[in-house]
């Protein structure tokens, strides 16, 4: 059947199949813990159906509502912003330690908390990060198979397409999601197999090179990112400690690794806005010395950025560096999604905060102290922002200090 003749219901079902068969890949008998915004319920039902078809034993769904989140900031007592549902996260931790898979659907309103007190936003995020830390460590170490996919919602669509009617904006966002997720391909699973092979080939090249650092140069950017000792590049397919091969992110265009958190120097400017904690940050400019952020500015969202970096000690150091070609499908779409899952796959990016232990050889079996000795950062946050464009060049720095072209004007060299 041609793509133009498929109904919305058929395309939504194909997206659910991609999320389950390409992304999560639950094993027979495995439980699934699924979180999603209430607007995603039609997609949640389809994902649940396909998870059971693949052999999942139980799908437990937790729905979130943006308006309820806003009510907390409007009417909650000041003491309400230092608490988090630790009982809920303890249950999730128990599930993941017993091999439950993690499925998340994103679609939140990028500007949900615009106008709310940045201090309260920061306090709530810090409390949540502390309570969620045991869960996030199981995810970032890929102890279990997990996946993040997305669902179009009206607030998100109107942020992207404010000039369109509600219906047209929502339809346009759905079209973009289907395309970016390869759900509109004639054979989505085959399309993802081909794409994963491309990412695996890029990973192999970089792992064979064993660069000691990457040097980013572009408008407002001259940044040297030292790479962790015994670092490994990842991207696309990933193998969980439970033996399941899965795709963590749908969509994905990146290959990424762990920087050495003490070996980052220079300055860098963001190339796309960042949606963070219900706010949109624009024009981010930061300077690093000895790995630490010593100066951070934003044209919009300065207070939110400052509070983020002050979350804990590790929040002012890098935990990830990722390479994405400027010609990636998401970049080529010309759309700004105001959603990190998409925008990070349109440009090279960095992330402050927690590093991925799987990106260090034998990192999954190391203690926190052993990971730190290799250069891995520790934090209760992990926030990506985009620093790549068609004007950015990247060199790989070899162990003897020689520079080799990795990207020129945003494309693989």
Image: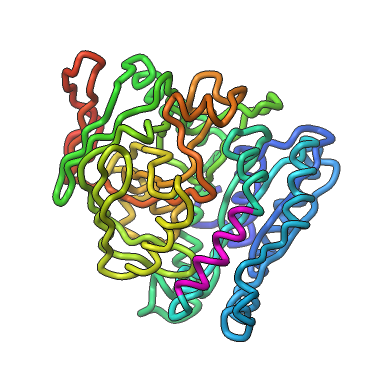
Which quadrant of the figure has residue 399?
A: top left
Examine the rendered structure and indicate whether residue 229 appears above or below residue 281.
Answer: above
180 is within the stretch colored magenta: no
Tell me the quarter of the picture where residue 7 sits: bottom right
Which residue in the rendered view is the most extreme toward the left?
219
Give the side of residue 43 with respect to residue 162, left or right.
right
Residue 259 horizontal side relative to residue 83, left or right: left
- Observer-nearest residue: 344 or 117? 117
Percent from the top left, x then y, of residue 283?
Answer: 25, 62
Q: How is the image coloured?
A: rainbow
Is residue 213 found left or right of 8 in the rendered image?
A: left
Secondary structure mostly seen in the magenta stretch: helix
For the C terminus, give its image quadrant.
top left
Which residues, given as a range, are shown in magenta? Answer: 118-130
Q: At 53% across and 45% down in the image, what residue appears? A: 250
Residue drawn at x 45%, y 48% is: 313
Determine the residue positioned at 28% across, 43% down: 327
Choose between 231 and 343: the one closer to the eye: 231
Residue 156 horizontal/vertical position (percent): 48, 70
Q: How many marks?
A: 0
Q: Residue furthest bottom?
A: 75
> Which residue is at 59% across, 33% downward?
141
Give coordinates of residue 388: x percent, y percent: 26, 46
Q: Position of residue 4 (x, y in %)?
A: 49, 56
- Between 164 and 250, the one nearer to me in the picture: 250
Query: Residue 299, relative to residue 411: is it above or below?
Result: below
Measured along the vertical axis of the image, is residue 393 above or below residue 46? Answer: above
Instruction: Report which quarter residue 85 is drawn in.
Output: bottom right
Nearest the viewer among 326 and 137 is 137
């Amino acid at each position: 059947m041609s793509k133009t003749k498929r109904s919305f219901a058929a395309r939504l079902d194909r997206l659910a199949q991609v999320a389950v068969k390409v992304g999560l890949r639950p094993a027979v008998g495995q439980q699934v813990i699924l979180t999603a915004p209430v607007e995603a319920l039609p997609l949640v039902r389809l994902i649940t159906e396909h998870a059971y078809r693949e052999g999942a034993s139980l799908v437990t769904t937790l729905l979130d509502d943006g308006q309820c989140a806003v009510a907390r900031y409007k009417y909650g007592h000041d003491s309400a912003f230092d608490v988090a549902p630790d009982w809920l996260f303890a249950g999730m931790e128990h599930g993941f330690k017993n091999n439950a898979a993690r499925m998340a659907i994103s679609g939140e309103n990028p500007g949900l908390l615009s106008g709310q007190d940045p201090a309260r936003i920061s306090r709530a995020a810090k409390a949540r990060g502390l309570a969620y830390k045991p869960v996030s460590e199981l995810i970032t170490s890929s102890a279990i198979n997990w996946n993040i996919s997305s669902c179009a919602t009206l607030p998100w669509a109107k942020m992207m397409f404010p000039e369109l009617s509600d219906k047209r904006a929502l339809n346009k966002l759905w079209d973009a999601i289907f395309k970016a997720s390869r759900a509109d391909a004639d054979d989505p699973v085959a399309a993802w197999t081909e794409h994963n092979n491309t990412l695996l080939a890029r990973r192999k090249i970089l792992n064979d090179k064993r660069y000691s650092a990457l040097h980013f140069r572009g408008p407002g950017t001259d940044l040297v990112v030292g790479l962790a000792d015994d670092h490994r590049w990842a991207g696309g397919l990933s193998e969980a400690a439970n033996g399941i091969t899965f795709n963590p992110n749908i969509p994905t265009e990146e290959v990424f690794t762990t920087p050495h958190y003490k070996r980052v120097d220079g300055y860098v400017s963001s190339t796309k806005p960042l949606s963070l904690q219900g706010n949109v940050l624009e024009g981010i400019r930061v300077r690093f010395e000895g790995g630490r952020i010593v100066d951070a500015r934003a044209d919009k969202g300065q207070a939110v950025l400052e509070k983020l970096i002050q979350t804990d000690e590790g929040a002012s150091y890098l935990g990830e560096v990722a390479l994405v070609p400027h010609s990636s499908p998401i970049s080529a779409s010309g759309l700004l999604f105001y959603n990190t899952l998409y925008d990070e796959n349109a440009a090279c990016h960095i992330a402050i905060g927690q590093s991925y232990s799987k990106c260090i050889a034998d990192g999954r079996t190391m203690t926190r102290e052993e990971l730190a000795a290799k250069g891995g950062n520790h934090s209760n946050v992990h926030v990506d922002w985009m620093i790549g464009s068609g004007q950015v060049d990247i060199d790989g720095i070899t162990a003897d200090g020689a520079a080799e072209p990795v990207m020129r004007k945003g494309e693989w060299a």
